Image: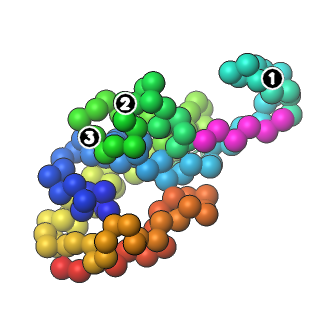
Amino acid sequence: MVTLLANPEWIGDERTVEELLRLHSVADLVALRVAVEDVEIGGQLVRAGEGVVPLVAAANHDPQLFGHPGTFDPERSAQQHVAFGYGVHQCLGQNLVRAEMDVAYRTLFERIPTLEIAVPLEELPFKYDGVLFGLHELPVRW
Ligand code: HEM
C-alpha cells in the first residue's frame, strides 16, 4: 500500500502485484530447508542433516536477475521471483494471495481515492525485526 501510495500512477494496474511481491518479499525467512544428503551449493558443502536458511529477499534482489532491484518497476518481468519459495513446498496460498492483492488494492483505492500517508515516508516504522516484513503502524488520512 505504501509503495502504491508513493507511486500512484500504478494504482489499478495488474502488473504491480508480481513486482510488489518481489520488491518487498514479506516472507523472507520462511523457506527453510534441511539437506537430506550432502550437497554443494555455490562452492559450500552442506552436509546431510544440516539446515539452510535461504533468504528470499536476497534472491529477489539479485541484480543479475533484476536490474536496479531496489526500484519499484512493474514494467520489468518479475515472474522469476521466489517470494513464495521454491519447489514442492512453495506457498500453497500463492494464487489466493495474488487475487487478494489485486482485488484489495483496487477496491481500497476505488473506495478511498483521496487516501494518503499522514507522515513523511522516512518516518514510517518498518519492521526489520520479524519473520514477516511490514510496518508496525501506518498513519493515513483521507
Ligand atoms: C503475501 C502472502 C504470502 C507470502 C509472501 C507467502 C510466502 C510463503 C513462503 C515463502 C513459503 C515457504 C515456501 C518454501 O518453503 O519454499 C510459504 C509456505 C506456505 N504458505 Fe504462504 N505466503 C503467503 C500467504 C499464504 C496464504 C494466504 C496461505 C493460505 C491460504 C498460505 C499457505 C502456505 C502454506 C500451507 C505453506 C506451506 C507449504 C508447504 O510446506 O508445502 N500462504 N508461503
The mark lying in front, picked from 3 and 2, is 2
Is the CB of mark 1 within 8 Å of ligand 1?
no
Mark 2 vs 1, N-terminal side: 1
Disc sitting over residue 45 in the figure? 1
Callout 3 amino acid: Pro
Pointer 2 residue: 67
Mark 3 vs 2, N-terminal side: 2
Callout 1 amino acid: Leu
Pointer 3 residue: 74
Callout 2 amino acid: Gly
Magenta-colored stretch includes residue 87: no
Is the CB of mark 2 within 8 Å of ligand 1?
no
Residue 6 in the figure: left or right of residue 38: left
The mark lying in front, picked from 2 and 1, is 2
Mark 3 Cα shell of 10 Å, populated few (<14), some (14-19), many (≥20): some
Residue 51: % across, % down: 79, 39
Residue 80 visible in the displayed image: no
Give the main secondary structure of the magenta stretch. loop
Q: Nearer the viewer, residue 28 or 66?
A: 66
Mark 1 vs 3, N-terminal side: 1
Residue 116: % across, % down: 22, 72
Where on the picture, by quarter, is residue 132? bottom right
Residue 104: % across, % down: 28, 61
